[in-house]
Amino acid sequence: MKKLILFGASLALALPGAALAGDAAAGKAKYDMFCSSCHGASGKGDGPAGAALNPKPRNFTDAAWQDKVDDAHIAKVIKEGGAAAGLSPLMPPWGASLSDDDVNNIVAYIRSLKGK
């Protein structure tokens, strides 16, 4: 039994990304509510509230950007805001409004926008 528990614990440590996997469909609903006004309905950074922002909101369809960031970085920006990750302070922190599951779902949805 101890070996099984140790195996499970080591597997969880070896695959941290798997624990963060979210549901893109559920993430879209939260994205539409919290993110689309700046980042746009299609994730291109062209939302109505984003038009007045400088710098412009992130274009989530940009494959080069998607390839260079990991899920933990995207989750940090969503939870703690842009300033916490050395980005624009105009990106607000949503950690008090979103559960960890919500954040993981939004990350999954953002990932689904790559190259669209």
Image (cartoon, rainbow, N blue to C red):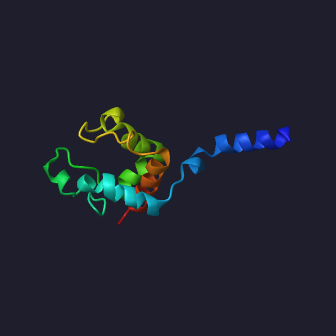
Count every numbered label the image shows and give the total: 0
What residue is rendered at 29% in x and 40% in y? 92
Which quadrant of the view contains residue 9? top right
- Left or right: 91 as drawn, with respect to 76: left
Residue 107: percent from left, percent from top: 43, 52
Quadrant assignment for the C terminus = bottom left
What residue is rendered at 28% in x and 50% in y? 58
- Left or right: 46 as drawn, with respect to 52: right
Which residue is most to the front?
A: 97
Viewer-proximal residue among 53 and 96: 96
Residue 80: percent from left, percent from top: 37, 36
Residue 32: percent from left, percent from top: 32, 59
Viewer-proximal residue among 22 and 64: 22
Residue 50: percent from left, percent from top: 19, 51
Which residue is most to the left?
A: 52
Residue 76 appearing in the image: yes
What residue is rendered at 17% in x and 46% in y? 53
Which quadrant of the view contains residue 16? top right
Which residue is most to the right?
A: 1
Viewer-proximal residue among 29 and 87: 29
Quadrant assignment for the N terminus = top right
Residue 60 appearing in the image: no
